[in-house]
Amino acid sequence: MMPAAPVVSPPALAPALLRLPRGLAACDIAFGDFDALADWDLAGRRPRVTAEPRASRVTVAVRRMRPIGRSARGRITLAADRCWTIECGHGLADVTIDASRPAFAGLAVAGGTSRLRVLLGVPAEPVRLRFAGGASHVELVREPGLAARLRFAGAHAGVRVDGARHTSGRGGDVTAGAGRTLLECKFESGAAHVSLSEA
């Protein structure tokens, strides 16, 4: 079997920030090519959006986390010529982040997280995810060969890494891949049903 080719990171991009001070649910976040910092359609929700181009900062505050209509989903697209950190002031639920392009620096969630899916390509710099509240049903799909680390500060159960199930417990790290770690995910509270796999 031929050894896996080393993962080569693309050039670094200028940093940018997306703030979600009231949390978000039933939404897809992706990265695209356009002149503005961001574009959005939150499926009936009327967010208060503040864009600060000079600071490369966008704030999207929604009064209600979920869209109008059971099957409706929102969408936020961020400019792919920057590297975005996403800060969530409350919880996340039923959210997908398509970070297949190297425009995603990390995610910090202050509240609870449920049903989060992150699709990660090869980033320019290490991607850091931090969950301050409890987290459940978190799926992380990374580029083949990408080294990753899951860090648990509290109790964890139902953790799978590249198809292998890990023993439930409290605290500790789980690693996958070799070389420079380009994905680090820290769970500061309890975590359940966490999956780390290759695309």
Image (cartoon, grey):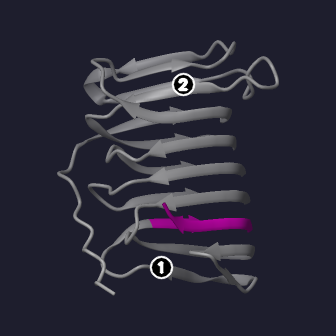
Q: Position of residue 90 (x, y in %)?
A: 67, 41
* Number of other residues with Cα within 10 Å of mark 1, as a class: few under 14, some 14 to 19, many 20 or more: some
Chief secondary structure of the magenta portion: strand
SS at mark 2?
Answer: strand
Rendered view: 15 above or below 56: below
Secondary structure under tag 1 reads strand
Q: Residues within 10 Å of mark 2 (few under 14, many from 20)?
A: many
Question: Which residue is depicted at the point 52% across and 59% down?
Answer: 141
- Residue 130 place in picture, x, y as percent: 55, 59
Image quarter of the N terminus: bottom left
The stretch of residues the image draws in magenta is: 184-199
Q: Is residue 134 left or right of residue 161?
A: right
Magenta span includes 172: no
The residue type indicated by label 2 comes to Val
Q: Which residue is mark 1?
A: 176
Q: Is residue 21 above or below residue 48?
A: below
| Image point (64%, 12%), residue name | 46
Q: Position of residue 70 (x, y in %)?
A: 82, 25
- Which numbered tag is attached to residue 60? 2
Asked if residue 192 is among those painted magenta in the image, a careful observer would answer yes
Q: Would residue 95 be visible to someone looking at this image?
A: yes
